[in-house]
Amino acid sequence: MLHLKAKENDFYVLLRESADQVVKSSLILSSAIDNHSALSEKMAELNETEQVADEITKTIMVKLNKTLVTPLDREDIYSLATIMDDLVDFIQGALERMIMYKATEPIHGARELIRILNDCVLLIKESIDCLSSIKTNFKDIMINTDRIHSLETEGDRLYRQEVAKLFEEEDINPIEIIKWKEILEHLEDAIDRCEDLSDTLKGVILKYV
Protein backbone atom coordinates (compact mmCIF):
# COMPACT_ATOMS: atom_id res chain seq x y z
CA MET A 1 0.00 0.00 0.00
CA LEU A 2 2.84 2.39 0.81
CA HIS A 3 4.40 1.61 -2.58
CA LEU A 4 1.11 2.36 -4.38
CA LYS A 5 0.74 5.61 -2.44
CA ALA A 6 4.24 6.65 -3.44
CA LYS A 7 3.38 6.09 -7.10
CA GLU A 8 0.25 8.20 -6.71
CA ASN A 9 2.32 10.99 -5.23
CA ASP A 10 4.77 10.69 -8.13
CA PHE A 11 2.10 11.84 -10.58
CA TYR A 12 1.27 14.93 -8.53
CA VAL A 13 4.97 15.77 -8.22
CA LEU A 14 5.51 15.36 -11.97
CA LEU A 15 2.47 17.46 -12.86
CA ARG A 16 3.72 20.19 -10.52
CA GLU A 17 7.14 20.03 -12.15
CA SER A 18 5.52 20.31 -15.57
CA ALA A 19 3.56 23.37 -14.45
CA ASP A 20 6.83 24.87 -13.16
CA GLN A 21 8.30 24.62 -16.67
CA VAL A 22 5.25 26.30 -18.18
CA VAL A 23 5.60 29.23 -15.79
CA LYS A 24 9.35 29.41 -16.37
CA SER A 25 8.82 29.46 -20.16
CA SER A 26 6.27 32.25 -19.96
CA LEU A 27 8.51 34.33 -17.70
CA ILE A 28 11.44 33.88 -20.10
CA LEU A 29 9.23 35.08 -22.97
CA SER A 30 8.12 38.06 -20.90
CA SER A 31 11.73 38.92 -20.12
CA ALA A 32 12.67 38.59 -23.80
CA ILE A 33 9.93 40.95 -25.01
CA ASP A 34 11.23 43.61 -22.62
CA ASN A 35 14.84 43.15 -23.70
CA HIS A 36 14.86 42.91 -27.49
CA SER A 37 18.66 42.80 -27.68
CA ALA A 38 18.76 39.58 -25.62
CA LEU A 39 16.39 37.48 -27.76
CA SER A 40 19.03 34.89 -28.70
CA GLU A 41 20.11 34.47 -25.08
CA LYS A 42 16.50 34.04 -23.97
CA MET A 43 15.91 31.57 -26.80
CA ALA A 44 18.72 29.40 -25.45
CA GLU A 45 17.12 29.49 -21.98
CA LEU A 46 13.75 28.61 -23.45
CA ASN A 47 15.17 25.71 -25.46
CA GLU A 48 16.64 24.24 -22.26
CA THR A 49 13.31 24.65 -20.49
CA GLU A 50 11.47 22.98 -23.38
CA GLN A 51 13.82 19.99 -23.19
CA VAL A 52 13.18 19.64 -19.45
CA ALA A 53 9.42 19.89 -20.07
CA ASP A 54 9.64 17.16 -22.73
CA GLU A 55 11.49 14.85 -20.36
CA ILE A 56 8.88 15.37 -17.65
CA THR A 57 6.09 14.59 -20.11
CA LYS A 58 7.88 11.43 -21.28
CA THR A 59 8.32 10.33 -17.66
CA ILE A 60 4.60 10.81 -17.03
CA MET A 61 3.72 8.73 -20.09
CA VAL A 62 6.06 5.91 -19.05
CA LYS A 63 4.61 5.90 -15.53
CA LEU A 64 1.06 5.85 -16.91
CA ASN A 65 1.93 2.68 -18.83
CA LYS A 66 3.55 1.03 -15.83
CA THR A 67 1.30 2.07 -12.95
CA LEU A 68 -1.70 -0.05 -12.08
CA VAL A 69 -3.50 2.48 -9.89
CA THR A 70 -3.36 6.21 -10.67
CA PRO A 71 -4.61 9.05 -8.42
CA LEU A 72 -6.66 10.55 -11.27
CA ASP A 73 -8.12 8.96 -14.37
CA ARG A 74 -5.38 8.08 -16.84
CA GLU A 75 -6.89 10.17 -19.62
CA ASP A 76 -7.00 13.20 -17.31
CA ILE A 77 -3.34 12.87 -16.34
CA TYR A 78 -2.50 12.40 -20.01
CA SER A 79 -4.50 15.48 -21.03
CA LEU A 80 -3.02 17.70 -18.32
CA ALA A 81 0.52 16.61 -19.17
CA THR A 82 0.18 16.98 -22.95
CA ILE A 83 -1.55 20.36 -22.81
CA MET A 84 1.17 21.75 -20.53
CA ASP A 85 3.77 20.37 -22.92
CA ASP A 86 1.92 22.05 -25.81
CA LEU A 87 1.96 25.33 -23.90
CA VAL A 88 5.74 25.30 -23.60
CA ASP A 89 5.96 24.53 -27.33
CA PHE A 90 3.68 27.46 -28.24
CA ILE A 91 5.69 29.82 -26.03
CA GLN A 92 8.92 28.58 -27.57
CA GLY A 93 7.39 29.00 -31.05
CA ALA A 94 6.44 32.62 -30.43
CA LEU A 95 9.99 33.57 -29.45
CA GLU A 96 11.43 31.51 -32.32
CA ARG A 97 9.36 33.52 -34.77
CA MET A 98 10.51 36.83 -33.34
CA ILE A 99 14.09 35.75 -33.98
CA MET A 100 13.53 33.90 -37.26
CA TYR A 101 11.59 36.77 -38.83
CA LYS A 102 13.97 39.39 -37.41
CA ALA A 103 10.90 41.23 -36.16
CA THR A 104 11.23 44.88 -35.22
CA GLU A 105 10.75 46.21 -31.68
CA PRO A 106 7.72 44.44 -30.15
CA ILE A 107 4.31 46.01 -30.60
CA HIS A 108 2.09 46.89 -27.65
CA GLY A 109 -0.34 44.05 -28.39
CA ALA A 110 2.36 41.40 -28.08
CA ARG A 111 3.36 42.67 -24.66
CA GLU A 112 -0.27 42.67 -23.51
CA LEU A 113 -0.92 39.14 -24.79
CA ILE A 114 2.19 37.94 -22.95
CA ARG A 115 0.91 39.64 -19.79
CA ILE A 116 -2.38 37.73 -20.15
CA LEU A 117 -0.47 34.51 -20.84
CA ASN A 118 1.61 35.02 -17.68
CA ASP A 119 -1.53 35.53 -15.61
CA CYS A 120 -3.04 32.34 -17.06
CA VAL A 121 -0.03 30.11 -16.43
CA LEU A 122 0.33 31.33 -12.85
CA LEU A 123 -3.29 30.35 -12.23
CA ILE A 124 -2.61 26.99 -13.87
CA LYS A 125 0.40 26.43 -11.64
CA GLU A 126 -1.61 27.34 -8.56
CA SER A 127 -4.37 24.92 -9.57
CA ILE A 128 -2.03 22.03 -10.42
CA ASP A 129 -0.39 22.47 -7.02
CA CYS A 130 -3.82 22.00 -5.43
CA LEU A 131 -4.70 18.74 -7.23
CA SER A 132 -3.40 16.44 -4.53
CA SER A 133 -6.15 17.78 -2.20
CA ILE A 134 -9.04 18.31 -4.61
CA LYS A 135 -11.85 18.33 -2.07
CA THR A 136 -10.09 20.84 0.15
CA ASN A 137 -9.11 23.08 -2.78
CA PHE A 138 -12.20 22.62 -4.95
CA LYS A 139 -13.45 26.19 -4.58
CA ASP A 140 -10.03 27.74 -5.26
CA ILE A 141 -9.50 25.65 -8.39
CA MET A 142 -12.97 26.54 -9.69
CA ILE A 143 -12.28 30.24 -9.14
CA ASN A 144 -8.99 29.88 -11.02
CA THR A 145 -10.63 28.15 -13.99
CA ASP A 146 -13.22 30.93 -14.21
CA ARG A 147 -10.45 33.55 -14.11
CA ILE A 148 -8.56 31.76 -16.89
CA HIS A 149 -11.72 31.75 -19.00
CA SER A 150 -12.10 35.51 -18.47
CA LEU A 151 -8.46 36.08 -19.38
CA GLU A 152 -8.84 34.00 -22.55
CA THR A 153 -11.83 36.13 -23.55
CA GLU A 154 -9.73 39.24 -22.95
CA GLY A 155 -6.93 37.71 -25.04
CA ASP A 156 -9.30 37.00 -27.95
CA ARG A 157 -10.56 40.58 -27.91
CA LEU A 158 -7.05 42.00 -27.69
CA TYR A 159 -5.79 39.76 -30.51
CA ARG A 160 -8.55 40.88 -32.89
CA GLN A 161 -8.01 44.51 -31.91
CA GLU A 162 -4.24 44.40 -32.45
CA VAL A 163 -4.47 42.58 -35.79
CA ALA A 164 -6.93 45.22 -36.99
CA LYS A 165 -4.50 47.94 -35.86
CA LEU A 166 -1.69 46.36 -37.85
CA PHE A 167 -3.66 46.75 -41.06
CA GLU A 168 -4.81 50.27 -40.20
CA GLU A 169 -1.31 51.71 -39.67
CA GLU A 170 -0.20 53.18 -42.98
CA ASP A 171 3.44 53.65 -41.94
CA ILE A 172 4.05 49.96 -41.07
CA ASN A 173 6.00 47.90 -43.60
CA PRO A 174 3.68 45.18 -45.02
CA ILE A 175 6.33 42.55 -44.25
CA GLU A 176 6.30 43.60 -40.59
CA ILE A 177 2.51 43.27 -40.57
CA ILE A 178 2.80 39.66 -41.74
CA LYS A 179 5.52 38.91 -39.16
CA TRP A 180 3.68 40.34 -36.19
CA LYS A 181 0.33 38.90 -37.23
CA GLU A 182 1.79 35.40 -37.05
CA ILE A 183 3.52 36.11 -33.73
CA LEU A 184 0.26 37.44 -32.29
CA GLU A 185 -1.54 34.33 -33.55
CA HIS A 186 0.97 32.10 -31.79
CA LEU A 187 0.51 33.98 -28.51
CA GLU A 188 -3.25 33.81 -28.83
CA ASP A 189 -3.03 30.05 -29.52
CA ALA A 190 -1.01 29.66 -26.31
CA ILE A 191 -3.72 31.47 -24.35
CA ASP A 192 -6.34 29.24 -25.98
CA ARG A 193 -4.43 26.20 -24.75
CA CYS A 194 -4.55 27.68 -21.25
CA GLU A 195 -8.32 27.65 -21.50
CA ASP A 196 -8.21 24.04 -22.77
CA LEU A 197 -6.22 23.10 -19.69
CA SER A 198 -8.63 25.05 -17.50
CA ASP A 199 -11.57 23.08 -18.96
CA THR A 200 -9.70 19.83 -18.32
CA LEU A 201 -9.01 20.86 -14.73
CA LYS A 202 -12.65 21.69 -14.19
CA GLY A 203 -13.67 18.29 -15.54
CA VAL A 204 -11.17 16.56 -13.27
CA ILE A 205 -12.23 18.20 -10.03
CA LEU A 206 -15.93 17.71 -10.72
CA LYS A 207 -15.30 13.95 -10.75
CA TYR A 208 -13.88 13.92 -7.23
CA VAL A 209 -16.18 16.14 -5.17
Image (cartoon, grey):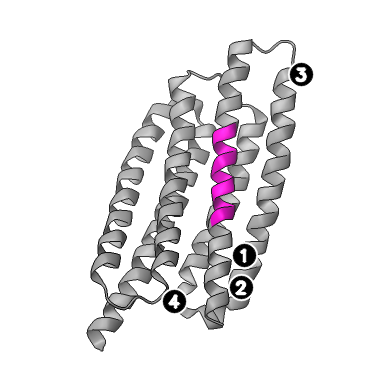
Earlier-in-chain disc, 3 versus 2: 2
Real-space CA distance between mark 4 and mark 1, rounded to the nearest whole angstrom: 16 Å
Real-space CA distance between mark 3 and mark 2, rounded to the nearest whole angstrom: 42 Å
Q: Main secondary structure of the magenta part?
A: helix
Real-space CA distance between mark 4 and mark 3, rounded to the nearest whole angstrom: 49 Å
Earlier-in-chain disc, 4 versus 1: 4
Residue 105 visible, this angle: no
Q: Is residue 156 above or below residue 146?
A: above
Q: Amino acid at mark 3?
A: Glu
Residue sitting farthest toward the bottom: 1
Real-space CA distance between mark 3 and mark 1, rounded to the nearest whole angstrom: 36 Å
Residue 49: x and y in percent read: 35, 45
Residue assigned mark 3: 168
Q: Secondary structure at mark 1?
A: helix
Disc count in the image? 4
Q: Amino acid at mark 1?
A: Asn
On-image quarter of the C terminus? bottom right
Real-space CA distance between mark 2 and mark 4, rounded to the nearest whole angstrom: 13 Å
Real-space CA distance between mark 1 and mark 2, rounded to the nearest whole angstrom: 6 Å
Q: Residues within 10 Å of mark 4 (few under 14, many from 20)?
A: some
Q: Is residue 195 magenta?
A: yes
Residue at left offset 66%, top offset 33% = 109
Q: Amino acid at mark 4?
A: Ser
Q: Is residue 22 magenta?
A: no
Residue assigned mark 2: 140
Could you tell me if the residues under marks 1 and 2 are in contact, i.e. CB atoms within 8 Å? Answer: yes
Q: Secondary structure at mark 2?
A: helix
Magenta range is 185-196
Splitting the image into 4 quarters, where does residue 164 fall? top right
Residue assigned mark 4: 132
Q: Residues within 10 Å of mark 1 (few under 14, many from 20)?
A: many
